[in-house]
Amino acid sequence: MLREAFTATMKDPEFLAEAKKANLDLNPVSGEEAESTIHGLFKLQPNLVARLREILVPRK
């Protein structure tokens, strides 16, 4: 149900127009692709996780 709602939102003309006005770069993936990516993250080596954290988490 959530995947269907997400997919519908990514096709909604009003949502896409608002995203464009906000200069959002949307590159949605399917639920299956997202699930696969997330599962892959749990298999990463600890040193790669630390490096990703450095890149993705803003410093305070």
Image (cartoon, rainbow, N blue to C red):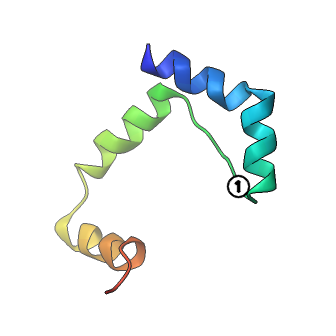
Where is 9 relative to 19, above or below? above
Where is 17 relative to 1, above or below? below
Q: Is residue 4 left or right of residue 41?
A: right
Q: Which of 38 and 21 is in front in this view?
A: 21
Name, please, the residue furthest toward the top: 1
Q: Which residue is drawn at 73% across and 57% down?
A: 22
Where is 43 relative to 60, above or below? above
Q: Which of 45 and 30 is in front in this view?
A: 30
Q: Which of 58 and 49 is in front in this view?
A: 58
Q: Quadrant of the N terminus?
A: top left
State which quadrant residue 40 falls in: top left
The residue that mark 1 highlights is 25
Name, please, the residue furthest toward the bottom: 60
Indicate the secondary structure of the residue bearing disc 1: loop
Q: In this view, does 56 lie to the left or right of 28?
A: left
Image coordinates of residue 54 in percent, x first then y, are 34, 79
Q: In which quarter of the image is the C terminus?
A: bottom left
Q: What residue type is labelled 1?
A: Asp
Image coordinates of residue 15 in percent, x first then y, are 72, 36
Q: Residues within 10 Å of mark 1 (few under 14, many from 20)?
A: few
Q: Which residue is drawn at 73% across and 26% down?
A: 11
Image coordinates of residue 57 in percent, x first then y, are 35, 73
Image coordinates of residue 41 in percent, x first then y, are 30, 51
State which quadrant residue 24 falls in: bottom right
Q: Which residue is drawn at 48% across and 33% down?
A: 33
Q: Which of 31 and 42 is in front in this view?
A: 31
The count of marks equals 1
